[in-house]
Image: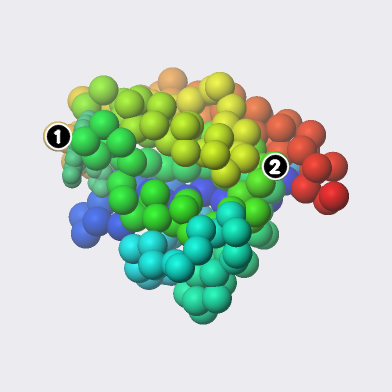
Amino acid sequence: MIRIGVIVGSTRPGRKADAVARWVHDIAAKRGDATAEVVDLRDYDLPHLDEMVPPSMAPSRQPKVRRWAATVAGFDAFVFVTPEYNHSIPGALKDAIDYLYQEWHNKSAGLVSYGVYGGTRAAEHLRLVLAQVEVADVRSQVALSLHTDFVNFTSFRPAAHQEQAVGAMLDQIVAWGGALRGLRQR
Ligand SMILES: Cc1cc2nc3c(=O)[nH]c(=O)nc-3n(C[C@H](O)[C@H](O)[C@H](O)COP(=O)(O)O)c2cc1C
């Protein structure tokens, strides 16, 4: 079984990210080859990065970050649910990625983005960041439009075809998550 963490990338009051993450989770939960869990950054209350040395050189000693590290270490694969903020990802999500290093390594990930144009610019930006922490992000992507997958730009009501897109993305992260297991165990 591949353990998938569905990361809620926005911490904003009134955010849409939690509804999107729950939708992804419920689709993933129907699979027989994976388990899924929603991981809400709000539950970790991470400060802006305030480490003396980069996490690639030494792991954090801060209790809040150690707790975050233990959560990330427990997954084989991730789905990053991210809105687009000024053509990139929210600062809270960037900090959450930056705080860790080895905990991300040799794991797979899929991207679910949303915005006026599907959040695709944020997703492309996120791919650059993930490469640096050695996460293998898959090709299949879910791009949700604020025009057509939300009612009045507010309530999440995904178009029917989007569930299929989630399925294709999950197929890939499960396959790559399994293929990378040997590297993770070294
Ligand atoms: C600071 C900020 C910047 C934004 N920039 C963009 C943008 O560049 N492109 C876009 O499509 N939407 C942009 N938006 C709209 C968000 O994608 C939209 O509000 C979305 O619902 C935010 O996700 P959230 O509700 O889960 O936080 C921006 C929103 C905020 C708050």
Vertical placement of residue 14 versus 27, above or below: below
Vertical placement of residue 49 versus 63, above or below: above
> Callout 1: helix, strand or loop?
loop
**Residue 137 visible to an observer of this rendering:** yes
Q: Nearer the viewer, residue 88 or 167?
A: 88
Q: Earlier in the sequence, mark 1 or mark 2?
A: 2
**Residue 30 visible to an observer of this rendering:** no
Figure quarter occupied by ligand 1? top left
Crowding at label 2, few (<14), some or many (≥20) Cα neighbours within 10 Å? many
> Callout 2: helix, strand or loop?
loop
Q: Kindly identify the amino acid type of the residue bearing the numbered disc 2.
A: Asn
Q: Nearer the viewer, mark 1 or mark 2?
A: 2
Location of residue 119 in the rendering, given as x and y in whole percent from the top left corner: 31, 29
Crowding at label 1, few (<14), some or many (≥20) Cα neighbours within 10 Å? few
Task: Report which residue position mark 2 lands on.
Answer: 106
Farthest residue in the left direction?
Answer: 152
Location of residue 99 in the rendering, given as x and y in whole percent from the top left corner: 48, 59
Q: In the image, what residue occupies the spot 62% across and 34% down?
A: 136
Q: In the image, what residue occupies the spot 21% across and 36% down?
A: 86
Location of residue 153 in the rendering, given as x and y in whole percent from the top left corner: 17, 35
